[in-house]
Amino acid sequence: MRPYDSRNDGYQNAAARAMPQGGGPGDQPQYGVPSQYDDYYAADEPYRPRRRGRTVKRALITLVVVLLVASVATYFWADSKLRKEVDLSQVIDRPEAGDGTNYLIVGSDSREGMSDQQKKDLHTGSADGKRTDSMMILHDGSAGPTLISLPRDSNVTIPKFRGSESGRIKGPMGATKLNAAYAMDGPQLLVRTVEANTGLHIDHYAEVGFSGFANIVDAIGGVDMNLGMGFKDKQAGADFQAGEQTMNGRQALAFVRSRHAFAASDLERTKNQQKFLSALASQTAAPGTVLNPFKLYPAMGAGLDTLIVDKDMNPYYLATMFLAMKDVTSDGGTSLNMPTSGSVGGNLQWDRAKVKQLVEQLNNGEPVTVSDSP
């Protein structure tokens, strides 16, 4: 007769079924399998399996799936907003690629989409057309990131090139200022000129205008800077005191455009541009921005809306470029102006021996030892 179980008003037979045939009080149950007699000593409440671990596991899986879906959605959203207008495949006579990835980063004086009041507030003027206000090569290689500023008044030779609209071969155009290449035929000729005068292969192109730059800074709540000296530049709208300060978009634009306040003019301005862009990248990549969607998405939107890139650029390369810019100020990073050795007709002449050594070090993945000091 089966033992009676008063707790569920029925017969307890689960243990009996688990017991091998012929089992009795003197037999040993299998390991982990209860005996039919164990029920007499069970707790008052029936056994219930714990589900807490299973619930936590499901919650974690759900969180991972949500984050993955959000990341994929963000990637395609960002990719759809990029203005992929520069076709580097049309650039002719290109040098061989070396170690790492080279980005040509350009700040233009484009006033596209700006109202008259915005032009006044940002001290941009109202000139027609578009010119390069700053140019930098960011090399992300095995020896660490290197940021090289190219003064816009650099004396370079514009080589023969394929017209971006006509498709016809033109030139060479002779010696002139570097920023004339952009004014003459846009980004593709600028890339062609930089490659021809350095021997460095440019992998990607990124350009941002006045309004986009200011909007990015405002979107992250400003950029913290510590200035060793104060200065004023009426033409750029700059008026800074020495010491720590947080620059908003208008102030940041004035800071990176100022050159009339310095004896070294454009060379000092490029140094300030490097410092500011590294600080901007560091603060944008900080957890307080990356993990805060109310800061991250406005900052991304502000930049992507006005960012002009090459056709092969995507959010991954853009993020890699940004992180390399952030790391420039670390122990493993280097920043310098393109080495110069004087001037020709008022334009800065590059030190060809140093330029050659610099490019060889970058292409070979070696630490940069070249100095921009005369």
Image: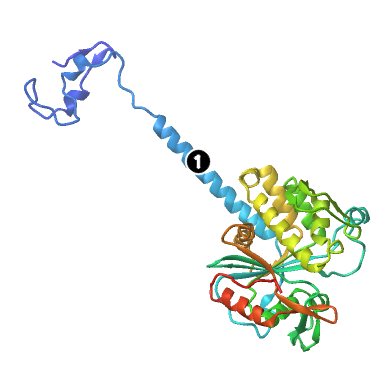
Mark 1 = which residue?
62
Near-viewer residue (222 or 39): 222
Residue farthest toward the top in the current orientation of the protein:
6
Q: Does 292 sit left or right of 12 as displayed?
A: right
Task: Give the residue displayed 20% in from the left and 17% down from the top.
Answer: 39
Q: Is residue 5 above or below residue 319?
A: above
- Using a 10 Å C-alpha cutoff, classify the residue at mark 1 as few (fewer than 14 neighbours), some (14 to 19) or many (20 or more): few
The residue that appears at 60% across and 62% down in the rendered structure is: 333
Image quadrant assignment for residue 33? top left
For the residue pair 288 and 244, the one nearer the viewer reads as 244
* Residue 97, picture quadrant: bottom right
x then y, percent, for residue 49? 34, 27
- Residue 368 drawn at (x, y percent): 59, 70
Q: Residue furthest front?
A: 374
Please, which colouring scheme is shown? rainbow
How many marks the image carries: the answer is 1
* Residue at (62% x, 66% y) in the render: 146
Work out whether residue 373 can be spotted. Answer: yes
Work out whether 234 lies above or below 44.
below
Percent position (x, y) of residue 180?
A: 82, 77
- In the rendered image, residue 310, in percent from the top left (x then y), is placed at 68, 70
Which amino acid type is shown beneath numbered disc 1?
Answer: Thr
**From this viewpoint, is residue 163 visible?**
no
Say which element carries label 1. helix
Of residues 6 and 314, which is closer to you in this image? Answer: 314
Which quadrant is home to the C terminus?
bottom right
Is 268 placed above or below 361 here? above
Residue in the image at 91% along x and 58% along y:
234
Residue 137 or residue 302, whichever sits in front:
137
Q: Look at the image and tell me in which quarter the N terminus lies.
A: top left
